[in-house]
Amino acid sequence: MKETLLVVCLLAGLTWNGSVQSSERTLACLKLCKCGIRPWFSPSSLYMEAPTVDCNDLGLLSLPEKLPLDTQVLLLQSNNIAKIEKTLDYLVNLTEVDVSQNNVTRLSDLNVGHLPQLLSLHMEENRISTLHDNSFSHLPNLQELYVNHNLLSLISDGAFQGLGNLLRLHLNSNQLRVIRPEWFNALNQLEILMIGENPIAQIQDMNFKPLSNLLSLVLARMNLTEIPDNALVGLNNLESISFYDNKFAKVPQSALRKVQSLKFLDLNKNPIERIRRGDFVDMIHMKELGINSMPELVSIDGFAVTNLPELTKIEATNNPRLSYIHPNAFYKLPRLETLMLNSNALSALHRVTVESLPSLREVSLHSNPIYCDCVVRWINMNKTKIRFMEPEALLCTGPPEFEGRHVRHVHFREMMDTCLPVIAPESLPDRVSVASGRSVSFHCRAFAEPDPEIYWVTPSGEKILPRMATSKYFMHPEGTFDIYDISENEAGQYTCVVHNLIGADTRSVSVVVNGFYPEPSNGSLHVQIVAVRPNSVKISWIPPKSSFVSNIMWSTTTVSNHPSLRFTARVPSDVRVFNLTHLHPMMRYEVCVEITDLQKGHLKTCVNVSTTEEAVAEAKSDRSGVVVINSIGLLLVVSAVTCSLIYMSLRRDSIYTKLSDQPATETPQGPNACPSPALTQRCRPEMNATAVDLTNTTN
Ligand SMILES: *[C@@H]1O[C@H](CO)[C@@H](O)[C@H](O)[C@H]1NC(C)=O
Ligand SMILES: *[C@@H]1O[C@H](CO)[C@@H](O)[C@H](O)[C@H]1NC(C)=O
Ligand SMILES: *[C@@H]1O[C@H](CO)[C@@H](O)[C@H](O)[C@H]1NC(C)=O
Ligand SMILES: *[C@@H]1O[C@H](CO)[C@@H](O)[C@H](O)[C@H]1NC(C)=O
Ligand SMILES: *[C@@H]1O[C@H](CO)[C@@H](O)[C@H](O)[C@H]1NC(C)=O
Ligand SMILES: *[C@@H]1O[C@H](CO)[C@@H](O)[C@H](O)[C@H]1NC(C)=O
Ligand SMILES: *[C@@H]1O[C@H](CO)[C@@H](O)[C@H](O)[C@H]1NC(C)=O
């Protein structure tokens, strides 16, 4: 549409140049103004060659006298006109008057007279404050009216009376505090209404009801936080609506459902935090959806955009915190061809997201911090026919060995097929201050393969699982955590834990309530020796409620004939007892338990213990054998540590642990060994503990 208009304009421009030259009119015209035939489009896009008087930008205080009688277009832009004293009704063919950027304060000062031919009136950028009843009834054929960028604070109910042919009305950038449906009673042909940038406190139900032919409504920059469910009722032909740059915290879904004919929705630049399931339900004619430049948007949830048979394009770009798109976010969109997701904080786009879109042809994913591992592996697997736009800007930001490389140039076999969850740093703030009585939500999301599970831990150490509700907390299945009716009791540190069987990541938010934040108390950790044998020592401890990983480290302290070996085992938080095996008899060991606690930080307690003397019957067994086993143990531990270092470098500073949901066991058993550093890709983080188990089994 735009392009064809442009072409027509260009062609028209060419013919105009010709006409001006051949025209004698210039001579007959006024001294200052330029006269000539110029191309002109009526508001309904009819093309005309119009005799034009151009008095733009001449510092005029009043209108020139005796304008050419055939004048159709009168341009008076950027002057200093405050009044038109002599009527213009002698210009019988006048179709457009432009008095924009002048000094008009009262509409009644524009004494233009009865102008039945006038189609277009430009009065933007003046200082008009009021539109009284019947302000335009002398212009019965007006099709477009521009009163934007004035000081309008009052419009009488009958101001637009008699404008039954008006197609386009611009009232944006004024001082209106209310929109009254009565204004629109006379405007039953209106197609375009721009009324944004007015300090309107609230849109009312049925606010636009008379506008049954309206096609496009612009409600941009109005600081709207919500609109009532029936605000858009009656807009039966509305195709496009813009809520650009408002303060909506969520998609005004109930109001939008009432506009069944909607095709284009612009929600850009609103502080929406997540696009939720069902946000666009029933908008069955939707063709294009804009979710751009949203400063707070973190996540597009599962089934957020679904069941829209005519949707061809989704544009969700320039959202600095958008770090997660659920694999099933876009679902049942049979015609979706274009997915614009560039310039967000996405580390990946899930294969399922793309595979569920049968008509998808192009994806724009560049300028995102793409992490080139398992989740995006599919991109290079040659099964996809999708075109990636601007591939030169589609770069890996990690893991370190791929940093800066083109995503499309990393062979998929170089990428791991499983990976740890990583919570995007953009998704959660470090600290928030809340007033008591308020509610707050945090959105924790992470890509991983296999898909991760999420839970939250409260300051008191309570574990809140998906769909769990308490009087103060609720956790949504996607990872969003709500705290209701906050009091100082809820102040403290909240931690999101995301884990899959490869490992876990955590991220904490400090919640300050009315300036209050509880100081973390330094708890102590007591380690008890439960049993001592010649070759083993069993210890126990009580981890604090909010801890989620324990490290056990042991080494000999008196070394003479044995090398000082240092062993480490990592166990899940619910393990409280551990049997250290393959120790040497009559040897002093230092055993340390280190716990990562969400409130108290690191807790570490060490005890010294000496193993007992070997029983005589066993004495002969095999001293050399123990050394061998120990060496094997060392090798395994060393290789395991190498593996985990490699793995660690592949995934940012995540905490490696097997967060088992199974009931506490004693020494954890792990089936996933890491036999040699060559096979690092499949190593699992719990292999430190596994190394211990292996020595155990060789016993
Ligand atoms: C006004 O337009 C009509 C139709 O194009 C034309 O016949 C008439 O001469 C015009 N009047 C003047 C004063 O130019
Ligand atoms: C605009 O008109 C007002 C009177 O209505 C006058 O005081 C003011 O000086 C005028 N502004 C300019 C820039 O001429
Ligand atoms: C919206 O709020 C901002 C900041 O409070 C204010 O500067 C601006 O004038 C408001 N805009 C409207 C149209 O009320
Ligand atoms: C994909 O196919 C192209 C050409 O068919 C080939 O050059 C490229 O190596 C293939 N990439 C992968 C990852 O198989
Ligand atoms: C906790 O320990 C840190 C140092 O580890 C210390 O600075 C802080 O004052 C202690 N807090 C309390 C409440 O004892
Ligand atoms: C610890 O493990 C060793 C070796 O498996 C075993 O002999 C010993 O009985 C265990 N100790 C306890 C207290 O269970
Ligand atoms: C254990 O022994 C080592 C070496 O003798 C000593 O440095 C350490 O302080 C002792 N630890 C405890 C907890 O007694």
Image: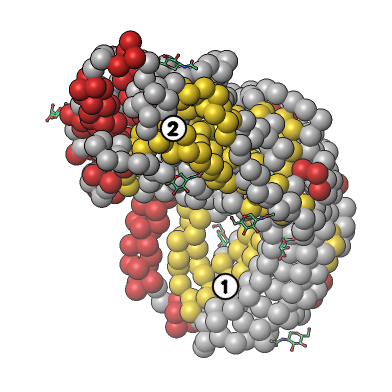
Q: Which residue ends up furthest to the front in the rendered image?
A: 616
Mark 2 closeness class: few <14, some 14–19, many ≥20 residues within 10 Å: many
Residue 364 in percent (x, y) is at 36, 40
**In the picture, residue 277 is in which quadrant?**
top right
The quarter in which the C terminus is drawn is top left
Residue 140 visible in the displayed image: no
Residue 474 in percent (x, y) is at 72, 30
* Residue 655 drawn above or below residue 98: above
Pair 1/2: label in front = 2
Q: Is residue 664 left or right of residue 562?
A: right
Q: Which mark is residue 610?
A: 2
* Residue 305 drawn above or below residue 75: above
Residue at image position (26%, 14%) is 621
Q: Please tell me which residue lies in front, 227 or 594.
A: 594
What secondary structure is found at the residue carrying circle 2? strand
Q: In terms of image quarters, where does ligand 3 lie?
A: bottom right
Q: Is residue 255 left or right of residue 239?
A: right
The quarter in which the N terminus is drawn is top left
Amino acid type at circle 2 is Ser
Residue at image position (63%, 59%) is 120
Amino acid type at circle 1 is Leu
**Mark 2 vs ligand 7: CB under 8 Å?**
no
For the residues labelled 1 and 2, the Cα–Cα distance comes to 100 Å
Mark 1 closeness class: few <14, some 14–19, many ≥20 residues within 10 Å: many
**In the picture, residue 229 is in which quadrant?**
top right
Q: Please tell me which residue lies in front, 658 or 526.
A: 526
Residue 523 in percent (x, y) is at 66, 44
What secondary structure is found at the residue carrying circle 1? strand
Q: Is residue 665 left or right of residue 485?
A: left
Residue 599 in percent (x, y) is at 64, 44
Residue at the spot of label 1: 75
